[in-house]
Image (cartoon, rainbow, N blue to C red):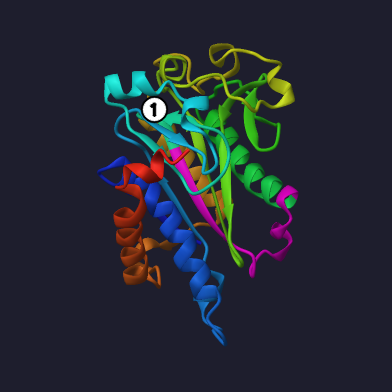
């Protein structure tokens, strides 16, 4: 698995890159007679937004899930991603990860239950390793479809986009993000997991760090190192086999979608 620790300058570029990755990898997998490593591409990127950013699911309705006037007033971008799921807000203190999975390499992962378990077990393991490294006495659980929790409080939400031979699975790791952003910019979600029990954002969501004994950057670095081990993500990004195709698709999606206000506010 290829690994890249890289954040783009703009929030649009970061969101567009995830879609570009799964698109070009799937096209490579469909090339007839291709027996190269391109047919089983897998990759992982970790990154962060440099300012609060709202990201809505592909099928979400903006006004059902977002306090849009507050976002516009505060200059908080509202972007639509290619994957499903509910709306999130992320920014400094929230580590983002994106994993490209090959169905040709992991055929059983075509089953969504298998995919959720496969990805979440690795993300949970990386988180537990990071907590243990700093002697933080917390235990990670998986609840709902693909949430990670501590004492039934959510710190990681996740979503996926499935193509013919590839899947993009991406999500959040709340380390030390200001949780008042959630109350200010996000409405209570119309779809809620049963274990939430109708709790408000502030009683349902938590950070992994609760004091300043460990810095967010220190924890993020520890998590990244653990995740690389869990995923066996040791291939340097400079060796990624389709750099020009990925760059071209990224540019195309930026022009046709992610810089187009209508794409983000179509629903």
- Tell me the residue at 30%/24% (across/down): 72
- Residue of label 1: 93
Q: Residues within 10 Å of mark 1 (few under 14, many from 20)?
A: many
The picture quadrant where one finds residue 240 is bottom left
User: Height in image: 132 above or below 252?
Assistant: above
Q: Nearer the viewer, residue 252 or 69?
A: 69
x, y percentage for residue 191?
A: 64, 28
Picture coordinates of residue 239 (x, y %)? 37, 69
Name the residue at 63% across, 33% down: 147
Percent x, y of residue 109: 69, 58
Q: Is residue 215 left or right of residue 166?
A: left
Name above or below for residue 72 compared with residue 26.
Answer: above
Please tell me which residue is depicted at 32% across the width and 61% down the height of the picture: 252
> What range of the chain is rendered magenta?
96-113
Residue 262 position by quadrant: top left
Is 131 above or below relative to 14? above
Q: Is 106 contained in the magenta span?
A: yes
* Front residue of 258 and 183: 258
Q: Secondary structure at mark 1?
A: loop
Looking at the picture, tell me which residue is in the foreground, 16 or 217: 16
Report if residue 198 is visible in the image.
yes
Measuring from the top left, give residue 118's x and y in whole percent: 68, 50
Magenta span includes 54: no
């Amino acid at each position: 698995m290829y690994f890249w620790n890289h954040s783009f300058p703009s929030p649009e570029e970061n969101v567009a890159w995830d879609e570009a990755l799964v698109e070009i990898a799937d096209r490579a997998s469909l090339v007839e007679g291709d027996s190269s490593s391109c047919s089983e591409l897998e990759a992982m990127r970790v990154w962060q937004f440099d300012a609060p950013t709202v990201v809505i699911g592909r099928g979400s309705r903006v006004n059902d899930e977002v306090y849009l006037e507050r976002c516009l007033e505060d200059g908080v971008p509202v972007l639509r991603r290619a994957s499903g799921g509910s709306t999130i807000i992320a920014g400094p203190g929230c580590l983002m990860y994106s994993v490209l999975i090959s169905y040709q390499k992991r055929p059983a992962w075509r089953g969504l239950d298998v995919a959720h378990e496969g990805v979440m077990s690795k993300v949970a393991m990386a988180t537990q390793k990071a907590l243990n490294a700093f002697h933080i006495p917390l235990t990670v659980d998986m609840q709902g479809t693909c949430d990670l929790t501590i004492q039934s409080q959510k710190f990681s939400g996740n979503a996926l986009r499935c193509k013919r031979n590839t899947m993009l699975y991406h999500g959040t790791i709340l380390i030390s993000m200001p949780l008042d952003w959630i109350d200010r910019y996000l409405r209570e979600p119309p779809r809620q997991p049963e274990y939430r029990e109708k709790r408000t954002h502030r009683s349902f969501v938590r950070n992994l760090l609760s004091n300043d004994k460990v810095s967010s950057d220190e924890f993020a670095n520890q998590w990244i190192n653990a995740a690389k081990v869990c995923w066996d993500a040791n291939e340097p990004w400079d060796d990624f086999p389709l750099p020009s195709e990925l760059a071209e698709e990224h540019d195309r999606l930026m022009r046709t979608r992610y810089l187009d206000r209508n794409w983000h506010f179509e629903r």
